[in-house]
Amino acid sequence: MKTQQKQPRPEGLLQNILTYLCFKCQTLSRTKLIKLVYLVEVYYYQLYSKRLTEIPFYHYYYGVWSPQVERKVEELYGKGILVEREVSTKKGFIAIIPKPNVKKTEVRLPKDVFEVLDMIVEDWGNALPDEVVEFTKTTLPFINTGFGEEIDFSRIDGIKEYAKEKGISEDEAATLDIIFNKKLKEKVLKGLKDIQGGKVFSYEEVFNM
């Protein structure tokens, strides 16, 4: 009697994240997949003020890069969990995209991770790979990291970054931020009031009062 071969399934957090994204995203490539995992980390950090994984990402030539994510993608191909499929693009080209070769029920993740992944899919699932690449370059952790360096996701918090840069406490930085925004609001309101009174100021005059 033949024993039934056990169906491979994604193991660990990263493999499950990658497999889920491959199920849900319509427009996908290996490059886009790596960038989406980075955005998962960005979204998660914004929501929970902590990393989802400890995967290192780097500021590199074509934006965010992670050798560890690349290796995990290769592992998924090696196990037969992902396979390459040919699809026709709108412009008539043939693209090779990663597709899951397992059932959706094999993907197992905590509820909060599923929620973040669905946000990513809604925002970027149909975006072109180049669009995702360019967006990752505008994120604060990427911008605030030097070329070749590991990306520090704590740099997503502007107040923390300002405190670190100025050598002050985060409370003091937050207070200065509130004072700045209050002064800015007062200047804008004064400018609007003067305009309503018939006086027109230049941009420089308004913001140097």
Image (spheres, grey):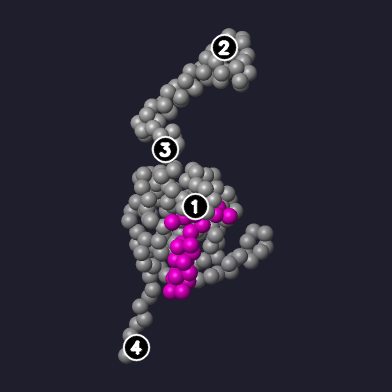
Q: Judge by depth and name the residue closer to the eye, 205 or 41.
A: 205
Say which element carries label 3.
helix
Return the residue at label 1.
Answer: 149
Inspect this view and state whether residue 127 appears: no
Identify the residue shown where x is 60% and y is 17%. Answer: 205
Residue 199 locus on image (x, y percent): 61, 10
Return the residue at label 3.
Answer: 164
Magenta-colored stretch includes residue 198: no
Q: CA distance from mark 2 to mark 3?
A: 38 Å
Say which element carries label 4.
loop
Asked if the residue under mark 3 is in contact with the one under mark 2, i.e. CB atoms within 8 Å, the reply is no
Identify the residue shown where x is 38% and y is 73%. Answer: 8
**Vertical placement of residue 165 versus 178, above or below:** below
Q: How many marks?
A: 4
- What numbered label is drawn on residue 194? 2
Q: For the residue marked with disc 4, what is the amino acid?
A: Lys
Residue that sits furthest to the right in the current view: 92
Residue 97 locus on image (x, y percent): 55, 65
- What numbered label is drawn on residue 2? 4
